[in-house]
Structures are given as C-alpha cells and as structure tokens.
Image: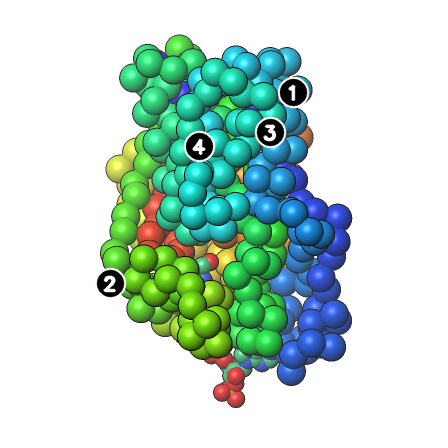
Amino acid sequence: MTAAITAIGGYVPEDRLTNADLEKIVDTNDEWIRTRTGIEERRILRGPGKATSDLCVPVALEICKKRGISPEEIDCLIVATVTADMLFPATANIVCDKIGAKNAWGFDLSAACSGFLYALTTGAMYIESGRFKKVIVIGADKMSSIVDYSDRTTCVIFGDGGGGVLLEPNYEGFGVLDSILRSDGSGRTHLHMKGGGSLRPASNETVAAKEHYIYQEGQAVFKFAVKGMAEVSAELMERNNLTPDDISWLVPHQANKRIIDATVHRMGLSDDKVMVNIQRYGNTTAGTIPLCLWDWESKLKKGDNLVLAAFGGGFTWGATWVKWGY
Ligand code: UT7
C-alpha cells in the first residue's frame, strides 16, 4: 500500500509586493532582483489578527471541497512552517479548530524550506502503516512576519503563501514512492532567527538587536543549496533507476532561479519539465512546493513521475519521488 495524493489546495494573499515597491523601501532595483533571483513580485498577508493559520485554512477547505469530504473525516493534519501563529499551541491545532476537523490530531513540523518534503514523507508513513486513512499535509509560511524590510539582502526574496495535499491509501502503486531526506545542524550559523526561542527569549535587547528577523548569509547558503539539492535529486533518480526521460516534472523549492537551473542541469532535464513560479510568489519557504503542484494541477497526468526537491535552513534538504495518481 502506498500513500497517494488525492487532492491539492493552495492559497496566496491578494496583496502584491512588487520589485518596484521594494525600490521605494530599500536600495535595490528590479534588474538586480530579477537577474540574481528570478523574482518579480511576492504576496503579503496583511491585516491585524492574520497569521499562518489563515493561509492554511483556505488550503484545507479547498482540499475537502475538491475531494468531497467533510473536515470531520480528516484523521491527521500536519503543518510544516517556521512562522507558527504562536510558539504553542501548534498551528495545526488552530487550523483544525478553524475548519471543524474535530476528529483530527496534528502537529507542526519545523524544517524550514524542506518542511513540506519532511511532512509529506511523515504523512505518507502514517498512511503506509495502515493506521490512518486521510492525512492532510500543508506547507505554509507568513515570511513577512520575520522579514526585516530594511535589509535588502533578505526582504527581496521572501513572500507569504501555502499549499497542501490530501494523502490516502492506494493499491495501484501511485503516490509517495521514495524520499531521501538529510539534515546538517552545523549549517544553522548561515541561516537562522536568533531571538524568540529558549536560547534568546524576547527582551528589549533582542528586539533592539533585530534578533527576531531572518539572518542569512546568502552566498554560503547558495553554495550549499546548489550542491545539496542537485546531489540528492540525482541520488534519488539513481536509487530508483529513473532516467531523465522517465521524469515528467521536477518540482523544486523556489529559493532562487539560479539554484533551480543548477539542479535541472545536474539531473539532465529540459527546462520544459520544471515547475517555476518564483517570479510570482518569491520564496514562501514551506509553501513553495505545494504551491507549484497547485498551479500545475491541470497539467499533471495519472502516472506522471514527479521529483520534489528542496534545500533550506537547518540545513535541511531532500528529494521525494511521487507518482501522480489522478
Ligand atoms: O530558501 C532557503 C534557502 N535560501 C537560499 O537558498 C538563498 C540562497 N542565496 C541566494 O539566493 C543569494 O545568495 C541571494 C539572492 C540571497 C543574494 O545573491 P548573490 O548573488 O549571492 O549576491 P551577494 O550576496 O553576493 O551580493 C552581490 C552584491 C553585493 O554588492 P557588492 O558587495 O558586490 O558591491 C550586495 O551588496 O549585490 C548586493 N546586493 C544587492 N544589490 C541590490 C545584495 N542584495 C541586493 C539587493 N539589491 N537586494
């Protein structure tokens, strides 16, 4: 028995933050952002009282509607995020409450940009065990809540959004077929948020030192990302005897168009087999991969082989082979 993806949902907020808007806030320009990252605009969740759970709720409801199920039928709901509504309780608990998933248990999973792959693999194992029949896996981040809009090296990259899938048992060989997941915590020095955890609890000092924002050494992360994402994707192909011809789609984490291009090259794929929507949404962290699936859903065919690949904070990285089931 495998865990098949049987429905997709996605959500991006209405408000757009364009490169032209950013030119007015920091010393940057449209040409630099496009050529160095591939991004043209990103979406921002504005308004008081709005949090990551508000990105997840429309995703979960779309999934239930498309599959024709009630939220009460959901057994488990996992939210991959680094921008939880609160440190506790889990955003997953809040989402279940907001959608009326009264019979579900759930939790948040923190693996930054690889969060969706970690959560998808985890959710698939719950299905494969035979214990649960309907597991929703969401990747969503309200990155605008931890971006310093006076730091041009990070504020041009990130956006808000999320997507998710429903996993159900399958007996025809469709679904999540293999994953290679990796982590290396020594990479934390290059990409992290210093304040707000047990190491540096919030204080006047941490706020003044801007410790509640993303800290990233872009070039260092870039080098690890190119190597990590390309190598793990190639390893997944070799381990499963998949040739470039066997692969219908690469679904890469959308951090930087140049990192995606390097992965495509290493896998020997042509550009028309790669999902890229970074120009419209920027880097939504755990949201990028399910948002790609959501955007491309109408083009996917039963039996298509998809390789999902990500690299991010932790460091965490990985690749997952999915055979599309509908
Ligand atoms: O998703 C989680 C994992 N994260 C990633 O995968 C991100 C990986 N890193 C990257 O994508 C890239 O490193 C960045 C997009 C963050 C930066 O691009 P880069 O090509 O590595 O730029 P850089 O940091 O080497 O900076 C090159 C120049 C510098 O100026 P000088 O020193 O050469 O005069 C920067 O100050 O570009 C300057 N610069 C900018 N200029 C205009 C940096 N940010 C900007 C900006 N606008 N926004």
Task: Give the spatial CA distance, label 2 vs label 3.
Answer: 37 Å
Q: Secondary structure at mark 3?
A: helix
Q: Earlier in the sequence, mark 2 or mark 3?
A: 3
Closer to us: 199 or 252? 199
The residue singled out by tag 2 in the image is: 186
Residue mark closest to the camera, 4 vs 1: 4
Residue that protrudes farthest toward the front in the picture: 204
Query: Percent x, y for residue 229?
Result: 37, 53
Q: Is mark 4 within 8 Å of ligand 1?
A: no
Identify the disc placed on residue 66. 1
Identify the disc placed on residue 78. 4
Query: Percent x, y for residue 46?
Result: 70, 53
- Looking at the image, residue 177 sits to the left or right of residue 279; the answer is left
Q: Earlier in the sequence, mark 4 or mark 1?
A: 1
* Residue at image location 55% in from the left, 27% down from the top: 97
Quadrant occupied by the C terminus: top right
Label 3 is placed on what type of residue? Lys
Label 1 is placed on what type of residue? Lys
The residue singled out by tag 3 in the image is: 98
Residue 280 visible in image? no
Q: Earlier in the sequence, mark 3 or mark 1?
A: 1
Q: Is mark 1 within 8 Å of ligand 1?
A: no
Task: Give the spatial CA distance, label 4 vs label 3.
Answer: 15 Å
Task: Give the spatial CA distance, label 4 vs label 1.
Answer: 19 Å
| Crowd around label 1: few <14 · some 14–19 · many ≥20 (10 Å) | few
